Amino acid sequence: MLDKIVESLHEAVADVQDGAVVLIGGFGASGVPTALICALLEQGARDLTIVNNNAGNGPRGLSQLVEAGRVRKMICSFARSSDRKNPNAAAFADAYRAGRIELECVPQGTMAERMRAAGAGMGPFFTPTSYGTPLARGKETRVIDGVGYVLETPLKGDLALVKAQQGDRWGNLVYRYAGRNFAPVMCTAATLTVAQVDEIVPLGAIEPQHVMTPGIFVQRVVQAGDQHVH
């Protein structure tokens, strides 16, 4: 019987290796798999490359991972926290200025398309975004029909951590509103996808036409409702 449900957050991330490329879903505070990130913090993996919309938003989760010195490189679109009351808001900025962490700034649409290309088995692609800006330095550029383009490469992850509203034992997922954000494309671009869900529902409870991420792209499902990671 195919069953992708794991019993604990710790089990869900137990085999993450040092140096892994980790794709983390979320946009601002929406759809962030905070419980899984905290479990990864306790798990101990180091020298991680994190792909996320920002460099930490809120007092828990990614900010803590950066503060603990576990992130070697950040690939994101917005390298600051919008939460001024967050005690870890300066974690990334301080680490970056001290040379303890690398930054690759990628426009949101380009980041999403790079992951989509990886998930679809595609090669590099041309995009007009960032042409003529510092973000295009060191990259191949072309002018086609009078429009400038930048060559971007697929962005694949060893691991994707996403948050969904519902999941079943086959790994089919449904997200809530903006919680969907980057998660579906991250699931396709990762070798291993772990989904933190609010509710595990019986097989068949999610209508096929309502499935947002098919289970073929998800390897582990964990319900985070009553589990607390310190």
Image (cartoon, rainbow, N blue to C red):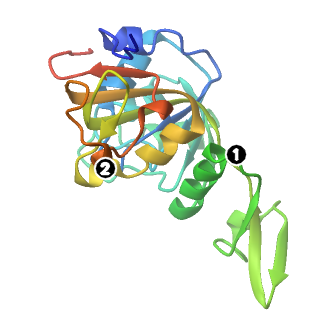
Q: Which residue is mark 2?
A: 209
Q: Earlier in the sequence, mark 1 or mark 2?
A: 1
Mark 1 in CB contact with mark 2 (< 8 angstroms):
no
User: Based on the displayed image, in which of its 4 quarters is residue 226 positioned?
Assistant: top left
Residue displayed at 75% across by 69% down = 150
Q: Amino acid at mark 1?
A: Gly
For the residues labelled 1 and 2, the Cα–Cα distance comes to 24 Å
Q: Give the crowd class for mark 1: few <14, some 14-19, many >=20 residues within 10 Å.
A: few
Q: As drawn, which residue projects farthest toward the bottom? A: 146
Q: Is residue 229 at least partly visible in the picture?
A: yes
Q: Is residue 227 above or below residue 146?
A: above
Front residue of 144 and 4: 4
Task: Give me the residue at 45% from left, 11% from top.
Answer: 43
Q: Position of residue 228 (x, y in %)?
A: 21, 16
Percent position of residue 33, x then y = 33, 33
Q: Is residue 174 above or below residue 126?
A: above
Where is residue 161 shown, x and y percent of the image? 43, 31
Front position in the image: 120 or 130:
120
Indicate whether 19 appears above or below 62. above
Q: Residue furthest left?
A: 226
Mark seen at residue 121: 1
Specify the quadrant that holds the C terminus. top left
Using the rendered image of the protein, determine whether residue 51 is visible from the camera's viewpoint: no
Which element carries disc 2, helix, strand or loop?
Answer: helix
Above or below residue 55? Residue 139 is: below
Dot 2, crowdedness within 10 Å: few (<14), some or many (≥20)?
A: few
Is residue 41 rendered to the left or right of residue 153? left
Figure quadrant of the N terminus: top left
Badge nearest the viewer, 1 or 2 = 2
- Specify the amino acid type for callout 2: Gln
